[in-house]
Amino acid sequence: MSHYSGSKKKWYGIWILSSIIVLCFCYIFRPNVRYTDEFAVLLNSINVISYTMAFGIPFFLAASISFSSSVSKSQAQTKYEQGASSIRVFLSGLGKSYLLASFFVVCSTIALFIEPSVTGTTFYTPQGTGFLIYLPSVIIASLFISFILTSIGVFLAVLTDEVILSTAIGSTLTIFLALIIGWVPYVLRNSLTRSIAMVSPHNLLRTLAVSLTNYDISTSGGITSLVGFQSTFGTVISNLAFFAGIALIFILLSVRVLHHNVSYWKIESGQSKDDEIWAANVEGSTSGNVKPIARELKMRRVGLIIGIGFLILTMSMGTAAYQTTVREESTIVFYQSPDGGEPIHLGEWYIFSCNVQSVSYDVYHYLHHECHLIDWGSAPSEVTYFYSMLNMSTLEFNNENETARRNHCNSNNRTQGDWGGMGGSWNLLYGTGTFIFVLKIVAANNESLSGSILFSIKLSQSAGWP
């Protein structure tokens, strides 16, 4: 008993220490939050908690300890020998896993909500409601997602029958999923994958926590500015139901695998009889029966590693193909110079109209300009150029005086030999309608000088950051 007690304390100590390390790491590298009002405390907490879920260690390790440690195996085996059903034995371990995961997210969330009071955080425009009203939303959302992750971890634990391996496999899966789909909210906002952001549980946590509050998100620029992607309460619930279904399937599979595991735990501990499924036709010692056990476990583990590797590779390739499809289907070329370029005469305004259209994907779209210098031509050695992308019509721009036109534009000076052209993109968010790209080049020292520069110009629209 003392041996098992010591082993139990050791694993729980490892879980506590690793969970604290993961939490501190995620806190240090969390996205910065502007404390405009009390709702920022919720955003800060879900950023940290979601990062811990992307790493997964506190949840997968909790499941592994509850099902794959020597203590948990011994306890499960004893309960089976005492006549307990497979469901009862499994639910006991599942309850311990959920209890550990719940303890972690509840304590972490409370600590993150206490932090503003300890550090004396000042809100720029306080609501006056206090920030503790958002605590239940974060705890409820965190519990839901932690249960899903822990259920997946339980299946990995009983399938591999090994603590470290199952934890490593689970964490590898969630880390790569977060990296592939999108990890950071402000990066996700401009990502082509933000339409499928909730495929990663850590992103689902963010939007679920926000959805459970009565906060007016329009005051902060909408849900996209808060969590990095668009969502509605309906889509959140449907994605939550999807993951809950996956968790349920893993739970049912885990019950069967656990029942099978107990039969060879007896053999491994030398307590099996000759009528055990692993001991058929074996005489004398049970040591020979350990070999088929080891073979099956090895096959399981290798198969799982190959399967997870294939899943990650498939997700990476699928995501890349999805991004390519989004970009190709959303790209519209408004203007393209003929082969060999076209002359841009000094002192003249060049106006190119772009009729921006809506895109069929929930991503921001951009206007791009590419101006490649082909030949300096007859221009003087130093020029000044004015350029901009404007949300107005050609007629409106032409009706303005020269001063107003230039005030709309960016300007730079360039000398012959150090300028290859220019390019850039404008984030239109969801904007549509008529835009114009304007360009004018003049001699830097004497605008009355004439000449021309040979340029190749391309104007286009596409979804996502280029």
Image (tube, grey):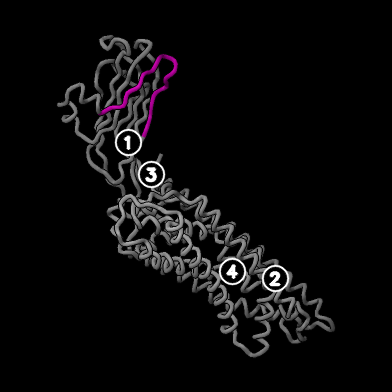
Q: Residue at x 39, y 21 (%)?
A: 373
Amino acid type at mark 4: Ala
Q: CA distance from mark 1 to mark 4?
A: 53 Å
Q: Residue furthest left?
A: 399
Q: Residue at x 32, y 61 (%)?
A: 232
Instruction: Name the spot of residue 390 as percent of width and height, x first.
Output: 25, 33
Q: CA distance from mark 1 to mark 2?
A: 58 Å
| Residue tagged 4 | 62
N-terminal label among 1 and 2: 2
N-terminal label among 4 and 2: 4
Left or right: 291 with respect to 143? right
Kind of element beneath mark 4: helix
Amino acid type at mark 1: Val
Kind of element beneath mark 1: strand
Give the quadrant of the C terminus.
top left
Q: CA distance from mark 4 to mark 3?
A: 39 Å
Instruction: Name the spot of residue 333 as percent of width and height, x first.
Output: 32, 36
| Residue tagged 3 | 464
| Residue tagged 1 | 333
Give the quadrant of the N terminus.
bottom right
Check whether the beta carbons of the residues at disc 4 and disc 3 lie within 8 A of each other.
no
Residue 296 - label = 2
- Reply yes or no: does residue 235 show up in magenta: no
Q: Counting other residues with Cα less than 10 Å from the Cα at mark 3, is it few (<14), some (14-19), or many (20 or more)?
A: many
The part of the chain drawn in magenta is: 408-424
